[in-house]
Amino acid sequence: MAVILENRFLGDEMYLLSAQYEGKAEPGQFFMIRSAGSFPLLSRPLSIFDVQEDSISFLYKVIGEGTKEFSRLSQGMELDLYGPFGKGFDLTPEGLNVALVGGGMGAAPLFYTAKRMRELNPDQEITLYLGFQKENAVVDVFKELNLPLILNFGGYVSEEVDYEKHDVFYTCGPEVMMRRVSSHGKEFGKPVFVSLEKHMACGVGACLGCTCKTKEGNKRVCKEGPVFPGEEVFYE
């Protein structure tokens, strides 16, 4: 059980949920989360948005009954947190110029990724490219990082990226967007790492409900992922 510290509405049905937490977690990993009551029956996978000394945060959007139940939670209530799970982002990539490209809820794992990269290598140049359907306060949270931030509302943020400038690309969001980033990265001979989003029931690889197609066969997003080299994935 974890006690909720905040469940802040950020616009466009998005919330930033923070809870007490004193463990370790890596950028790009996720937790399986459910409210402490009997509903929803199954936990929901949420990417880690941020980790601090005694708390952890998750960005989510209300898109169904499970996340709608999350939106009703308030300070002092309890959550079931299971995790962290999965393989996260490599925080020591080759090259000093990194692009983080997030579309919609794909922005969620990029905040902590950018934060930890900068802590580990202050000389690294990090540029954030974020795309949303509508303006929202998530952008204001990202501005707290004091990093170059390029925004796109209602279009394709992948078209805003300077593929010649950056050495490596990290991306999460709609598969059509990640496919474009991977394609452009390949065109310029630069590595791309994608974080896939799939429906999950268990989070530990047992149910096989989150498999994706790769050049090496089917892999479990919750176990072998969610982060994969972009050129290995067959996008839907």
Image: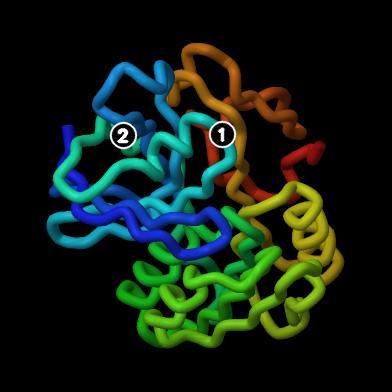
Q: Is residue 2 above or below residue 168?
A: above
SS for callout 2: strand
Which numbered tag is attached to residue 39?
none
Mark 2 to mark 1: distance in Å? 22 Å
Indicate the quadrant containing the N terminus: top left, top right, bottom left or bottom right: top left
Neighbor class of circle 1 (other Cα within 10 Å; few <14, some 14-19, many 20+) is few
Q: Nearer the viewer, mark 2 or mark 1?
A: 1
Amino acid type, residue under disc 2 in the picture: Gly
**Residue 26 in the image: x percent, y percent?**
35, 51
Neighbor class of circle 2 (other Cα within 10 Å; few <14, some 14-19, many 20+) is some
**Residue 109 in the image: x percent, y percent?**
47, 56
Residue lying at 41% horizontally and 74% vertically, measured from the top left: 141
- Which residue is nearer to you in this view: 132 or 205? 132
Determine which residue is flagged by label 1. Answer: 64
- Which residue is nearer to you in this view: 222 or 66? 66
- Which residue is nearer to you in this view: 56 or 189? 56
Quadrant position of residue 211: top right
**Residue 194 in the image: x percent, y percent?**
63, 51
Q: Are marks 2 and 1 in contact (CB under 8 Å)?
A: no
Q: Using residue 119 as the reference point, say whether residue 234 is left or right of it.
A: right
Amino acid type, residue under disc 1 in the picture: Gly
Q: Is residue 173 above or below residue 233?
A: below
Determine which residue is flagged by label 2. Answer: 83
Q: Using residue 151 as the reference point, say whether residue 184 is left or right of it.
A: right
Residue lying at 46% horizontally and 64% vertically, measured from the top left: 10
Quadrant position of residue 55: bottom left
Q: Is residue 6 above or below residue 70?
A: below
**Residue 14 in the image: x percent, y percent?**
50, 56
Q: Is residue 94 above or below residue 162?
A: above
**Which is nearer the N-term, disc 2 or disc 1?**
1
